[in-house]
Each structure stands twice: as structure tokens, then as C-alpha cells.
Amino acid sequence: MHLVRTVLDAVVIGGGPAGSFFAWELAKRGVDVSVFEEHSAVGVPSHCAGHLSIRSLRSLGLYPLPEGIVENVFSGANFYSPQGTKFSVHLAQPVTCAVNRALFDRYLSEKAEAAGARYFLNSRVQSLMNENGFVKGVNVIQGDKAEEKVSAKVVLDAEGISSRMLRQAGLPTLKREGLVYAVEAEVENVKNVEEHAVEVYVGNEYSPGFYGWLIPRPYGTAKVGLATRNGNPKEFLQRLMRRHPVASTQLANAKITRMAFHAITLGGPVTKAYSNGFLAVGDCASQVKPTTGGGVIFSITCAKIAAEVASEAVKRNDLSAEFLRLYQKRFEETLGFDTRVMLKIREFLNALSDEKMDKALRFAARTGLSGALRDVDEIDFQGRTLLTVLKKPATYAALAYFAALYLFANA
Ligand SMILES: Cc1cc2nc3c(=O)[nH]c(=O)nc-3n(C[C@H](O)[C@H](O)[C@H](O)COP(=O)(O)OP(=O)(O)OC[C@H]3O[C@@H](n4cnc5c(N)ncnc54)[C@H](O)[C@@H]3O)c2cc1C
């Protein structure tokens, strides 16, 4: 079967949240769009905790979600130092939810299909078709068939954490030093956790350069994971489950039912995510929060902007980099300030020793910081959140204290 015979308006590489939301938005605008997904089904295998902000989902028109996709909602978080010091935040209402990522991704793809997008599964994009400095389509292998050329006016790279297509398009690639390596496990028989609070384990002993998490699900099950900038994430997970003063009690009898490994990009968005006939969205463009590694909301937010620009470009028949540059400008206006603040916070956290981290959590617990954060409902655009909570004396005091810890980080 020939995949496509004529020149398509748009081709999408990858049926993850970035690719499907882009396809949905484009199809709604009447643009002919085809998505190539290398796996035999959308959403699998999943590697993601699916912890998302309710407010952001709502503002993207995605909340409430159909039944079954949301596994739990959260109004609290407990942070633990490697020594077991606890700092809790309990908010006035649920601000986050955990989604089943396979079902969430499938939902987005079904919406895109219903709007007119076409999906080709088992279809791996091998390379870009480059002609005279323009991306003119992709070379695809479907199943065990021979490679086919698929011409398109615009190609959207939404392949996840990889720089393969960026390199072929002549664009800057993901920063290696911004990568951490994660493990995500599903577990049964979890004890001593609050139903509607996520557990966060900070410090270098268990997750150098990142943190560990436990996201409770119904019936004593949970998603547990961590990431590390060096070493083997599976060994760090075993250490967390066996030796962490709190996690080891919560997970003493836990059974791991599934495990996945994947990298997370924390280096901030790439400096150029467009070229002639080409746009990059989502993890491949590093549109991920440098603090938490959350990338779903930023991917979808940027996919929407990419679709607005791409549909306009197709309409004008101007797929030049000069026009597509508008995408970079708009997404930087949307994410730029917050990602810069989050990069600084990540730098600050990475510089703290475990002893300083313990002191910081003790200080936060003593000063009533938890009360100052009670009304927070914005967790994605953290620069803006910081500006809001800084008006409260407890936050101000905590920030001054944390700044001192940072300045004397190596003392
Ligand atoms: C352990 C872990 C936990 C995480 N937890 C969270 C969280 O709680 N909340 C959050 O917001 N984010 C989280 N993230 C990040 C989140 O998973 C990503 O930011 C998000 O999935 C990015 O979406 P995407 O569409 O860019 O890429 P992906 O979701 O990776 O989708 C890319 C798709 O492209 C397909 N593909 C790749 N190459 C090709 C090709 N050549 N041809 C055809 N198809 C191709 C893949 O099969 C895949 O379906 C987590 C990440 C990890 C590793």
C-alpha cells in the first residue's frame, strides 16, 4: 500500500501528546495532516508518571477528561530530605492529577482523528527529505515494507527525546549536560501514604541532579520513580526502596509490576526549533520544566502555537524559516520567563549538599512556608507563581534563607 501519493499539507513524526495535539489543532483548521507513529498503538509503551496540572489542562480545554483517564487527584505534597526530614504542603483544593498516559495519549489521537487527521501506525520516519535547504517531507518505513517517500509542505518533529531530526534539519541539538536518566515503576502494596498527596524524595544520596517521586493510585498501588544525572537509575531506585528512611517503610512490601527507562531533558527549550518547512515541538525541542521534568503541558502548549503558525503558513503557501520563526517567538513569549526562573531554581537545587537540603526543609517546615503556599494553583509557570507567593512574608524569609544556603553551597 502506498502511504500517500500526493503532496500533503503537513506530516507529523510521532503520536505523543505534542504530535497529536498539533494534528488535532491543525485538522480543526481544515489542514490535511498525517501522523506517523512507529509503534503499533498510540501511547505505548508508556514511560511517564502523568502528573499534570489541572489548571493547565483546563486552560487547554482538556479538563475534565473522560472517565478512566484520571487515576487520582492531589491537593498535597510531602517533601523528604535524605535524612527523612519532612516538609508538607497542603493546598486548598486539588491542583494536580495523575493520568494514565497510554489512555491520555490515545484520547488526544482519537480527537485528532475525529477532526480529520490520519494516523499511520507501525510507521517509522527514517529521515527527512531535504531539497535545496528546505525540508520537503519524510522517508517512512511502514512495518516490513520498503521505504516510501512522503512529500509534505511542512514537517512537524514530535519524536520525543531525540536530536535525530533536528540534526538533519541543521538545527542545534539537545544539551547533553541537561539530560537526566529516569526509571518509572508501577508498584503494588504501598503503605503509609496519604491518598491525595504526592511523595517527593530530594537529595543526592537517592537521585543526584533530580528527585524521586511516589504518586499514589487506588488500592495501594502507586507510580514510583526517580532520575539521576549519573549512575544507574535502577540501582538508585533499589537504594531508595531499601534505605531511604521514609520510602523504605512505604515500600517495604511493595512489588514492582512494571518498569520503564527513559531520559528527561532539563536544559530549557532549544534556541532554534524551526527551519525551512520544519518545526520541532515537545521533548525534542526540550520544552520541559527544568525543575520537575514535566513536559506534557509545555509540549501541548507549544503544539498549539505551532499549529496556529503552521496553518497560517500553509494558507499563505509560505513555509520559509523566515515565516515559521513566528513559532519560536510566540513560544518563547509564553515559556521564556518561567523556564529561565526554573533553570535558576534547578541550578540552586543541584548545588545544595544533602545536609543543606535537610536544613532547607527544616527551615521551610518551621517558618510556615506551607501556609504561604496554600492557595497556589499554578505549578507549570513557576516564575509567575514565585512572583505571587513572594508577596507573603514567610516565602520571602524562606527565599532569603535559601539564597544564603546557595551562596554558601560549597562552604
Ligand atoms: C520517567 C518519566 C516521568 C515523567 N513524568 C512526567 C509527569 O509526571 N508529568 C509530565 O508532564 N511529564 C512527565 N515526563 C515527561 C513527559 O513524558 C514528556 O515531556 C512528554 O511525553 C513529551 O511528549 P512528546 O509528544 O514530545 O514525546 P513522547 O511522549 O515521547 O512521544 C513521542 C512519540 O514519537 C514516536 N516516535 C519517535 N520517533 C519516531 C519516528 N522516527 N517515527 C515515528 N514515530 C516516532 C514515539 O513512539 C512516541 O510515541 C516524564 C518523563 C519521564 C522519562
Image (cartoon, helix red, strand yellow):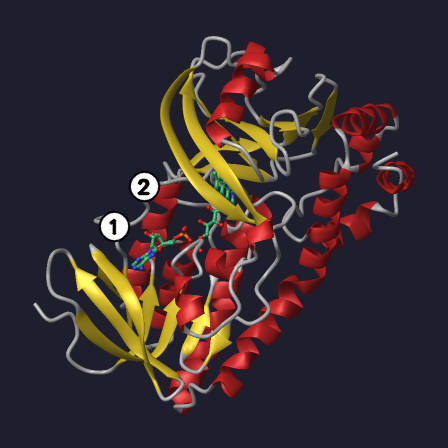
Query: Image height check: is 360 above or below 117?
Result: above
| Dot 1 crowding, Cα within 10 Å, few <14, some 14–19, many 20+ | some
Q: Position of residue 154 (x, y in %)?
A: 36, 78
Disc 1 from disc 2: Cα separation? 8 Å
Label of residue 308 in the image: none
The quarter holding residue 9 reads bottom left
Question: Hey, which residue is sitting farthest left in the picture?
Answer: 1
- Looking at the picture, does residue 58 appear above or below residue 74? below
Q: Residue at x 50, y 19 (%)?
A: 238
Ligand 1 closer than 8 Å to label 1 CB: yes
Q: Identify the secondary structure beneath mark 2.
A: loop
For the point 47% across and 40% down, which residue is it?
Answer: 50
| Residue 111 in sight | yes
| Residue located at (33% from left, 77% from top) | 31
In the image, 378: left or right of 70?
right
Foreground residue, 316 or 282? 282
Q: Earlier in the sequence, mark 1 or mark 2?
A: 1
Q: Amino acid at mark 1?
A: His
How crowded pointer 2 is (Cα within 10 Å; few <14, some 14-19, many 20+) is rated as few
Are discs 1 and 2 less than 8 Å apart at CB?
Answer: yes
Q: Percent position (x, y) of residue 67?
A: 37, 38
Q: Quarter holding the C terminus?
A: top right
Tell me the kind of residue under disc 2.
Pro
User: In the depicted view, which residue is nearer to us: 360 or 220?
Assistant: 360
Q: Which secondary structure, mark 1?
A: loop
Residue 148, placed above or below residue 236: below
* 193 or 349: nearer the viewer: 349
- Residue tagged by mark 1? 39
* Residue at the image point whose x is 67% and y is 44% from the top: 377
* Labelled disc at residue 45: 2
